[in-house]
Image: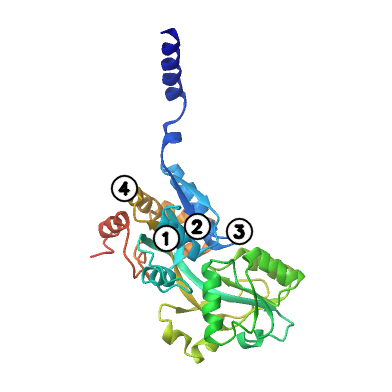
Amino acid sequence: MKKIKSIVLALVFTALVIPMDLFSQVYKFSGGPSGGTYQYYASAISTIAKKNDVRVLASSSGGSIENIRTCNSGKSSFGVAYSGHVFAALNGNLNKDDNKYEDVRSIGFFYGAPGQMIVEKDSEIKSLKDLEGKRVGVGNAGSGAAANAEMMFKHLGLWDKIKHENLGYRGAADGLKNGPLDAFWVFAGYPNAAVLEVALQEDVVLLNLWDELNNSNYFASNPFFQKRVIPANTYNGQTKDVPSFQDGALWIANKDVPEDVVYKLCKTIWSPEGLASMVEVHKSAKAMSVAGGLTGIVTPLHPGAAKFWKEMGVIK
């Protein structure tokens, strides 16, 4: 009997001294590779959420496609993914994958992610077609960057004519700086940390992607892409605006994440204080606003997000 009383007292003591949030649900947020914009967003939301009594754990990942799969399966509660990929996944049209990912819901628009192809300034590479026979870092396997690179190069008939390497942004930047890469591809908000670093150490340039792809009717068959100009002086040595294209990076969730959790996070992140904190973490978050919260979203919303956007008057 004394032993039982001791156990009960110990449990009561534990409940009193250990914060209750240690027993609360932890929601995994799949971001992206090291150096990528996705990971900054996952980490920022994890920090902001914690201050508001929601436990979100930021986790690195391969990027957009992987995040859609893990959110669909419930292995992740949240993630970041491109609007075009979420739409393709819902309809069973992902590259080499006809599965339908129907348990993913959209929450809101983060930023427009432009394509960026980086080459050495003194190289003979002046266009995408000049990459034939070259070694190109295209992003982590399973990432949105890699998927978009493959789609772009296949459209130009170059996918089987380049030596594509599945490397994350930092690894690819090192590959350009030290060899053996001739170019590397980034599909993320600017300024990208990996490009910033390599531009400070090497003379590099960004290729004009918009004109070359527009002239080949790429955007006629992929209407979810939009023109985006990377302003001069975004990176060291970049003296001119560089025309490119973008897809919208969205906050996504598994459909079974509780409605009240998503609603509370939306109210927190899209508050003036929340938006200011997001911009402090990454400048691309300047694109976030309540008015533009549903930009580029063409797939079903999470009920918690729908409640929030209706309350804010974005959904009439």
- Local crowd at mark 3 within 10 Å, few (<14), some, or many (≥20)? some
Q: Is residue 244 visible?
A: no
Lower sequence index among marks 2 and 3: 3
Spatial distance from mark 2 to mark 3, Cα to Cα? Answer: 12 Å
Q: Which residue is mark 4?
A: 260
Whole-percent x, y for residue 56 in the image: 46, 47
Circle on res. 64? none
Q: Which residue is mark 1?
A: 251
Amino acid carrying mark 4 in the image: Asp
Spatial distance from mark 1 to mark 2, Cα to Cα? Answer: 9 Å
Q: Which residue is mark 3?
A: 34
Residue at left 31%, top 50%?
259
Whole-percent x, y for residue 202 in the image: 74, 72
Lower sequence index among marks 1 and 3: 3
Give the answer, above or below, for where 190 lies relative to 45: below
Residue at left 59%, top 85%?
158
Task: Determine the image quadrant of residue 207.
Answer: bottom right
Amino acid carrying mark 3 in the image: Ser
* Mark 4–mark 3 CB contact (< 8 Å): no
- Local crowd at mark 4 within 10 Å, few (<14), some, or many (≥20)? some
Q: Nearer the viewer, mark 1 or mark 2?
A: 1
Query: Which element is circle 1 on?
Result: strand
Spatial distance from mark 2 to mark 4, Cα to Cα? Answer: 21 Å
Residue at left 74%, top 70%?
177
